Amino acid sequence: MKSIILIGCLIGNLCVFTSDEITTASLTPSPAIVEASTQELQLLTVNRISLYDDPGTVVRKLGEPELITEDAPISGFEIYQYPDMNVVFRDGIVDFVEILEGAEVLLIDDELIPATTRHITEALGEPDYETEDGIVFERNEALLKLFIEPGNGQLTSISYFHSSSM
Protein backbone atom coordinates (compact mmCIF):
# COMPACT_ATOMS: atom_id res chain seq x y z
CA MET A 1 0.00 0.00 0.00
CA LYS A 2 1.32 3.42 -0.99
CA SER A 3 1.33 6.30 1.53
CA ILE A 4 0.72 9.81 0.25
CA ILE A 5 1.53 12.98 2.20
CA LEU A 6 0.60 16.45 0.91
CA ILE A 7 2.46 19.48 2.26
CA GLY A 8 1.52 23.01 1.25
CA CYS A 9 3.71 25.94 2.04
CA LEU A 10 3.41 29.70 2.00
CA ILE A 11 5.67 30.21 -1.00
CA GLY A 12 3.09 28.79 -3.38
CA ASN A 13 4.29 25.24 -3.94
CA LEU A 14 2.71 21.94 -3.08
CA CYS A 15 4.91 18.94 -2.32
CA VAL A 16 3.56 15.43 -2.69
CA PHE A 17 5.50 12.66 -0.99
CA THR A 18 4.80 9.03 -1.76
CA SER A 19 6.82 6.01 -0.80
CA ASP A 20 8.36 6.05 -4.31
CA GLU A 21 8.93 9.72 -5.22
CA ILE A 22 8.69 13.42 -4.34
CA THR A 23 6.79 15.76 -6.66
CA THR A 24 6.61 19.55 -6.45
CA ALA A 25 3.80 21.48 -8.12
CA SER A 26 3.36 25.22 -8.35
CA LEU A 27 0.14 26.69 -7.00
CA THR A 28 0.43 29.87 -9.04
CA PRO A 29 -2.88 30.27 -10.86
CA SER A 30 -2.91 30.65 -14.60
CA PRO A 31 -3.49 34.20 -15.93
CA ALA A 32 -6.97 33.20 -17.16
CA ILE A 33 -7.99 32.16 -13.64
CA VAL A 34 -6.59 35.33 -12.10
CA GLU A 35 -8.39 37.49 -14.68
CA ALA A 36 -11.71 35.72 -14.13
CA SER A 37 -11.50 35.98 -10.35
CA THR A 38 -10.63 39.68 -10.38
CA GLN A 39 -13.62 40.45 -12.59
CA GLU A 40 -16.12 38.87 -10.19
CA LEU A 41 -17.98 41.50 -8.24
CA GLN A 42 -17.13 41.16 -4.55
CA LEU A 43 -19.74 43.54 -3.10
CA LEU A 44 -17.01 45.71 -1.59
CA THR A 45 -19.09 48.81 -2.28
CA VAL A 46 -22.61 49.63 -3.38
CA ASN A 47 -23.21 53.14 -4.69
CA ARG A 48 -19.65 53.91 -3.50
CA ILE A 49 -20.48 52.99 0.12
CA SER A 50 -18.69 50.20 1.99
CA LEU A 51 -20.01 48.45 5.06
CA TYR A 52 -17.15 49.95 7.08
CA ASP A 53 -17.79 53.63 6.30
CA ASP A 54 -18.62 56.14 9.00
CA PRO A 55 -20.88 59.20 8.53
CA GLY A 56 -17.96 61.50 7.64
CA THR A 57 -16.74 59.12 4.95
CA VAL A 58 -20.23 58.81 3.47
CA VAL A 59 -20.62 62.61 3.33
CA ARG A 60 -17.19 62.91 1.63
CA LYS A 61 -18.27 60.31 -0.96
CA LEU A 62 -21.88 61.41 -1.57
CA GLY A 63 -22.18 64.94 -0.23
CA GLU A 64 -24.57 66.12 2.43
CA PRO A 65 -27.75 64.03 2.73
CA GLU A 66 -31.14 65.56 1.97
CA LEU A 67 -32.27 64.65 5.47
CA ILE A 68 -30.84 63.00 8.58
CA THR A 69 -33.31 61.21 10.86
CA GLU A 70 -33.20 58.76 13.73
CA ASP A 71 -35.14 55.52 13.80
CA ALA A 72 -37.53 56.16 16.69
CA PRO A 73 -38.48 52.53 17.48
CA ILE A 74 -34.83 51.39 17.56
CA SER A 75 -32.43 53.72 19.29
CA GLY A 76 -28.92 54.13 17.97
CA PHE A 77 -29.89 54.11 14.29
CA GLU A 78 -29.28 57.23 12.21
CA ILE A 79 -30.58 57.45 8.63
CA TYR A 80 -28.95 59.58 5.94
CA GLN A 81 -31.48 60.07 3.14
CA TYR A 82 -30.19 60.57 -0.41
CA PRO A 83 -32.09 60.47 -3.72
CA ASP A 84 -33.03 56.84 -4.40
CA MET A 85 -31.21 55.52 -1.32
CA ASN A 86 -30.87 55.60 2.44
CA VAL A 87 -27.67 54.91 4.35
CA VAL A 88 -28.40 53.61 7.84
CA PHE A 89 -25.78 53.85 10.58
CA ARG A 90 -25.66 52.00 13.87
CA ASP A 91 -23.13 53.15 16.43
CA GLY A 92 -21.36 55.32 13.85
CA ILE A 93 -20.78 52.65 11.16
CA VAL A 94 -22.88 51.73 8.11
CA ASP A 95 -25.43 49.12 9.13
CA PHE A 96 -27.06 48.86 5.71
CA VAL A 97 -27.69 50.70 2.48
CA GLU A 98 -31.22 50.65 1.12
CA ILE A 99 -31.73 51.33 -2.59
CA LEU A 100 -35.31 52.49 -2.98
CA GLU A 101 -37.87 51.40 -5.54
CA GLY A 102 -37.55 53.51 -8.65
CA ALA A 103 -33.76 53.69 -8.65
CA GLU A 104 -32.60 53.21 -12.22
CA VAL A 105 -29.00 52.13 -11.69
CA LEU A 106 -26.80 50.57 -9.05
CA LEU A 107 -23.03 50.96 -8.71
CA ILE A 108 -21.50 47.70 -7.47
CA ASP A 109 -17.72 47.78 -7.00
CA ASP A 110 -17.60 50.77 -9.38
CA GLU A 111 -19.50 48.87 -12.10
CA LEU A 112 -22.71 50.54 -13.25
CA ILE A 113 -25.62 48.07 -13.43
CA PRO A 114 -29.26 48.76 -14.28
CA ALA A 115 -31.32 48.29 -11.10
CA THR A 116 -33.36 45.35 -12.36
CA THR A 117 -33.47 41.78 -11.12
CA ARG A 118 -32.30 40.49 -14.50
CA HIS A 119 -29.31 42.84 -14.82
CA ILE A 120 -28.14 42.38 -11.22
CA THR A 121 -28.41 38.59 -11.57
CA GLU A 122 -26.43 38.72 -14.81
CA ALA A 123 -23.72 40.74 -13.04
CA LEU A 124 -23.57 38.65 -9.84
CA GLY A 125 -24.52 35.20 -11.10
CA GLU A 126 -26.95 32.81 -9.50
CA PRO A 127 -28.31 33.98 -6.13
CA ASP A 128 -26.78 32.24 -3.12
CA TYR A 129 -30.24 31.66 -1.69
CA GLU A 130 -33.87 32.68 -1.92
CA THR A 131 -36.15 33.96 0.81
CA GLU A 132 -39.90 34.37 0.82
CA ASP A 133 -39.53 38.03 -0.13
CA GLY A 134 -36.51 38.02 -2.43
CA ILE A 135 -33.12 36.67 -3.45
CA VAL A 136 -29.73 37.11 -1.81
CA PHE A 137 -26.19 37.33 -3.16
CA GLU A 138 -23.39 36.74 -0.66
CA ARG A 139 -19.71 37.63 -1.02
CA ASN A 140 -17.62 36.99 2.08
CA GLU A 141 -19.34 39.04 4.81
CA ALA A 142 -21.37 41.26 2.45
CA LEU A 143 -24.93 40.52 1.34
CA LEU A 144 -27.04 42.11 -1.36
CA LYS A 145 -30.73 41.31 -1.11
CA LEU A 146 -33.23 42.06 -3.86
CA PHE A 147 -36.69 42.41 -2.37
CA ILE A 148 -39.18 41.08 -4.91
CA GLU A 149 -42.97 41.34 -4.76
CA PRO A 150 -44.21 37.71 -4.59
CA GLY A 151 -47.33 38.28 -6.70
CA ASN A 152 -45.84 40.07 -9.68
CA GLY A 153 -42.06 39.61 -9.40
CA GLN A 154 -41.46 43.37 -9.26
CA LEU A 155 -38.25 44.58 -7.59
CA THR A 156 -39.32 46.76 -4.66
CA SER A 157 -35.97 47.61 -3.03
CA ILE A 158 -32.38 46.46 -2.63
CA SER A 159 -30.45 46.19 0.62
CA TYR A 160 -26.70 45.94 1.07
CA PHE A 161 -25.64 44.79 4.56
CA HIS A 162 -23.17 42.82 6.62
CA SER A 163 -23.89 39.13 7.29
CA SER A 164 -23.44 39.68 11.03
CA SER A 165 -26.47 41.98 11.09
CA MET A 166 -28.83 39.12 10.23
Image: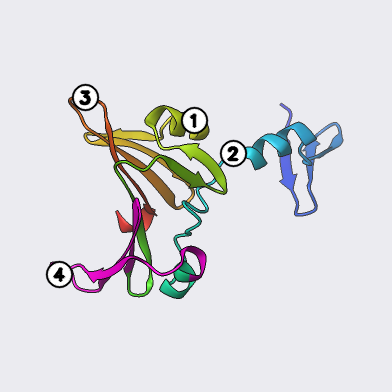
* CA neighbours of label 2 inside 10 A, class few (<14), some (14 to 19), many (20+): few
Residue at 45% across / 70% down in the picture? 59
The residue drawn where x is 49% and y is 28% is 122
> How many angstroms separate mark 1 from mark 3 (CA)?
22 Å
Q: Is residue 63 magenta?
A: yes
User: Residue 72 — which label?
Assistant: 4
Asked whether the residues under the numbered discs 2 and 1 touch, taking CB atoms below 8 Å apart as contact, a structural biologist would say yes
The residue at which mark 2 appears reads as 40
Residue 13 shown in magenta: no
Q: Nearer the viewer, residue 15 or 160?
A: 160
Residue 129 quadrant: top left
Cβ–Cβ under 8 Å for marks 4 and 1? no
- The residue beneath circle 3 is 152
- Type of the residue with mark 3: Asn
Q: In this rendering, would 13 be left or right of 65?
A: right
Q: Earlier in the sequence, mark 3 or mark 2?
A: 2
Q: CA distance from mark 4 to mark 1?
A: 37 Å
Label for residue 103?
none
**In x, y percent, where is residue 23?**
85, 36
- The location of residue 160, given as percent across then percent down, is 38, 51
Q: Which residue lies under the disc numbered 1?
A: 125
Gap in Å between the C-alphas at discs 3 and 2? Answer: 30 Å
- Measured from the top left, where is residue 114 in percent x and y? 46, 35
73 or 32, which lies in front? 73
CA distance separating discs 3 and 4: 32 Å
Specify which label sits upstream in the sequence, 4 or 1: 4
Disc 4 on helix, strand or loop?
loop
**Going from the N terminus, do you reach mark 4 or mark 2 first?**
2
Magenta segment boundaries in residue numbering: 60-89
